[in-house]
Image (cartoon, rainbow, N blue to C red):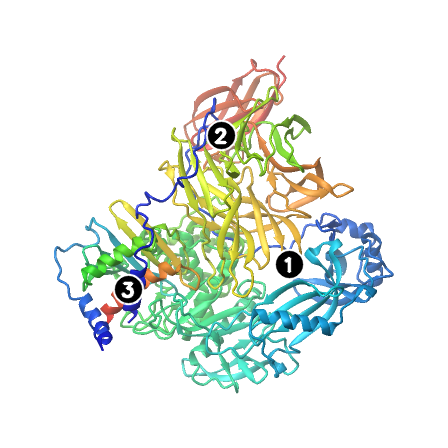
Amino acid sequence: MLFSICFLAISQMSFAQFKSIDGSETGVQPDIPQLQWNRTSDVNPPAQQPVTLVPMPIDKINLDKLVPSNIKKNEQGAIIWFDENYIKLHGLHRASNKADITQQIFKSSKLNPSQDALEFVETVNDEIADFDVYHQYHQDVPVYGAELRVHYKDEITKAINGKLYPEIALDKAQIQLSKETAIASVKQDVITHGTFQEIKNKALIAGDQTQASLVVFHKDGKLENATWAYQISIYLNLHDRWEYFIDATDGSVIEKYPLICTLHNHDHDHDAKPKKVSVMDGAVTANAVDLYGNTVNINTYEVGTDYYMIDASRAMFNSFGSSMPDEPQGVIWTIDAFNTSPQSNNFQYDHVSSSNNNWSGKNTAVSAHYNAGITYEYFVEKFGRNSINGAGGNIISLVNVSDENGNSMENAFWNGAAMFYGNGGSAFDPLAKALDVAGHEMTHGVVQATANLQYVSQSGALNESFSDIFGAMIDGGDWLIGEDVVNPSFFPSGALRSLQDPNQGLNGPQDLSKGWQPKNMDQYLQLENTAEEDFGGVHINSGIPNYSFYLFAVEVGVAKAEQIYYRALTNYLTKSSQFIDLRLAVIQSAKDLHGSNSNEAAEAAVVFDFIKIFDGQGTNTNTTVNENPGTEFVICTDDNNSKIYIIDALNGTFLNDNVQGQPISKISVTDDGQYAYFVDADKTIKEITIDYNTGSVDVGFLSDSPIWRNIAVSKDGFRFAALTDELEPVINVFDFSTGTQLSQAFDLYNPTYTQGVSTGDVDFSDAMEFDITGQLLMYDAKNTIEQVLSEGIEYWDIGFMEVWNSNQEQFAEGKIEKLFNGLPEGTSIGNPTFSKNSPNIVAFDLLDGSTGDYYILGANIETGENDVIYQNNTIGYPSYTIDDELVIFDTYGGNFGDKYLSLRAVDDTKITGIGDVIDYFENGKWGTIYGNGNRDLTTDTDDLASALSVVVFPNPSYGNVQISFSTESNDDFYFTVYNTVGQKVYEEKQTLPSGFNLVQLNISDLKAGQYALKIHSDTKSHTEIISLMNP
Amino acid sequence: MNKSIAILLIPIFVFCSCKTTQYTPANFEKAMISFGSGGGFTGAVDQYFLLQNGQLFSKSMGSDYQELPSPDKNFVSQLFKNYEILGLADINIEQTGNKYQFINYKSGQNEHKIVWLAGPNSSTDKLDLFYQNLMTLISYDKE
């Protein structure tokens, strides 16, 4: 029957438009005109680069470390931030006198003490937060969304954030509408969204079906839109709830939107709805029989007359944030998938529930629930880890999951958000039975939240290995994996894997399907990074690090070994770590915990030697390129987009303050600054050729077709990404590196990482920037998630697309990864920019839609770390300086909140803002910083300075420069001197022997001034700035 | 009555064809679709190969190809057409993760891979439809 249905569906689609399989008919949009390439001189030739790997998405946006700037208002005028300096300045020191605090806030925030009030609501004080919450009132009516948080550290006021609305000029006499009238109008309107059903049992909705209160409401958050409004929440029926804001002066609907429920995908049960915790509800326990037939004590949750398999008894439970049972926070939660598959369209799931707290017949769910609790406690007790994500996040298990064919699934997996357990079959018992399976799967979540080891080859094998290691530790008692769920006729050793003996007495790779794994690097299997070959053997070569743990634990004891390995995972390993990095991380962690000369550190080295992961250089995860040796410039427009300015960044003088053009998007510049590109107001693409000696520019067309919206040029100047004004999900890429113009249209799509989270469809892209290789394009894009009952949810996010393959000198396949693995609801990010010298570092704008707050964030796409560079008050369009020590961005600054291009320093991580904000160029907008020198953009050269102690002396000099350094082997070295506009003015090659070398350069013929001296071989490079005082 | 007969006959019709020249996926040069799933706790990879001439193989890691009963050539032909009709060649999804499915279309030097992770919303309707069609070959084989 299935076959018949499918065949019919296919037949009906046979008239669909056909595209050839080899892609020959895909690609270039026929109506996209070619560019007009007519350069008279070349920029840097494109460097040979390794094929770029698009980064793995980062899991979590870190807004915990807000960086104070000063008292700040957003674009709408609401006060959103008071910084530490402000607190000191105004004497807001301690929480002991709340009246003092509110008084001081009133003084500087233009709140009216006779009309407005700040009322203390509560103190939130737990392990990660300590703050008091205040709400703003106007004439004793709450101001919607006006909440202030005063943060403390050790009882000292640390920061104040939130939102206040000053200058409210409303009087209650303006209110013309009664609450009852407002509710009546809402009831009339809400039925247009579905069938209204009177709900008599209030327990089902934890309160009245309609709730209304008077508030002061600012539409779009703007001060001038302040009005009296009724905030009305109404249950249309048991399934749908709506929120309305009705203008209390004229009865109009200011805003309305649905409040969506989250669970209940299961068709058969829609009775239970989210409910606030009532006095009678709460955590209870029950004795239940698991899959071993043992009676275990489990934690469940009572809501009304029903019981749910939700464990809200752990320390992580957030009762304030929870709406039970459907929207709990900080719980262990077991869900029934009703023998459906998440890979099928009819996937169904719902609570595991009981009317009497009796769980007989639900042994699978009991086992999964019980095992998840033990696993949670293991990580808390051993490492102080608060749940999978380390922040008290839910631990979710789905049981009775079938495979993609609808058969019983002989497997279990982690999908990025939850654990899925199949019920086994011939080779396995139900997977939920075994504690090591639960430990294994949950540890995948821990790895994801920490090192985020990429699931390919050695890093993927480490990912699997940590899951096995902690799975075995949680289970305890043996070194086996899966021994309680495998059928020995399929797995002769009686286990799926063994840490103690990865070979399991089997014959070798031919017995992979029986449980053989390699145990040392001699047995390591070189496998392709394909799905067919286990992504490079992630479940196979994991035997090697598994064995390392066993050997180490035998030598130093399990208790020490698990602490050291956990520290290695959480402190030292990163996304692309390899086996050698595990060695280094374990040894370093042993030193951290037990001392540099400890037996533990020595034993770790012995163990890794034994399995033939020998000492060596760790994977360089912090690649950098040389800084541009030229002069630093800013190219930007003004707030009216009336013209273009080129500014000498250090001197603060204009190279040219009247470049003709009215850019409609940010200007893109080649890495050597010779050419800049922008889309003009007439939608043509303009090319600016810059003469740095005279400051003159030549502005010509790159495309005179009036169809464009944005343009980005690669660092080497040979490749362009361009967007048309069609607002379509396509990026057009043009390449000139092969001597002829090639073009390709790349479709934008949203890859999905966390299942159950819809990322919607891509509408169109806007900002774009190439990486240093010119192979990877970073872009932002607007997306829409369609909603059934309302307008779609729109948001912006950032992606990376492989557009060019330098090795093959052709376009890449357009593979896309996203910067973040799912954004918080209401959050948008955009305008991404790479740091100038660290390909792993990016900065971008973030808008928190729930608060209206703007941030400029930095992120390390290798480690997943991200932090606040600046809490802004508008969209910033950030750009790094050529030394990556500062970021320039748009902001409202100065004394009067005027538009500025401003600067803020970042620390060594390049993702954390430090120090004060410098207002740099009043009325400037969309600043792009660049240097006008030439540099080597390859990242695989080691820096000489740190490795070989390069000393250049004297400096300044009269042209006789000496360079001392040591080399490890005979090598050819080039000594190249560039002037400040990046021109090569001197070069000398010397073949140097190993050992200490003293090289003398005579560059006395050069004019006095600053130069960049580059010393480089095939594998090493170092650049030094030198000054000549030649007469 | 007629409908019942039709449903009954389809599986028989599908698997009754004769074999001709024998190849393996290793030496077959025309179009071939490999598909399957892998990962998870077990790490097992179940891979199948459908050759354009109608031969069907299975393979697990470390083992040799095992030939399965060949489906009807008309059905195979339809499947290969479906790959084009459904626009699978335009689907650019190559995800890596704990549990996954894959389809790999190979024709001469051209190869197009689709890998997607287990879970709701991780694939498209077209991809699901095509994968389910492929898996019917295996389901029938199991029966």
Q: Which residue is mark 1?
A: A850
Q: CA distance from mark 3 to mark 1?
A: 47 Å
Q: Residue at x 79, y 55 (%)?
A: A166
Q: Residue at x 54, y 71 (%)?
A: A377
Q: Position of residue A252 (x, y in %)?
A: 70, 63
**Res A180 quadrant in image:** bottom right
Q: Which mark is residue A966?
A: 2
Same subunit, labels 2 and 3: the answer reads yes
Nearest to viewer (mark 1 / mark 2): 1
Q: Is residue A455 above or below residue A380?
A: above
Which amino acid is tagged 2? Ser
Which amino acid is tagged 1? Ser
Question: Label 3 marks which chain's residue?
Answer: A
Question: Label 1 marks which chain's residue?
Answer: A
Nearest to viewer (mark 3 / mark 1): 3
Nearest to viewer (mark 2 / mark 3): 3
Q: Residues within 10 Å of mark 2 (few under 14, many from 20)?
A: some
Question: Label 2 marks which chain's residue?
Answer: A
Which amino acid is tagged 3? Phe
- The quarter of the rendered structure image containing the C terminus of chain A is top right
Q: CA distance from mark 2 to mark 3?
A: 72 Å
Q: Residue at x 49, y 59 (%)?
A: A447
Same subunit, labels 1 and 2: the answer reads yes
Q: Contact, CB < 8 Å: mark 3 with mark 1?
A: no
- The quarter of the rendered structure image containing the N terminus of chain A is bottom left
- Tell me the element at label 3: helix
- Tell me the element at label 2: strand
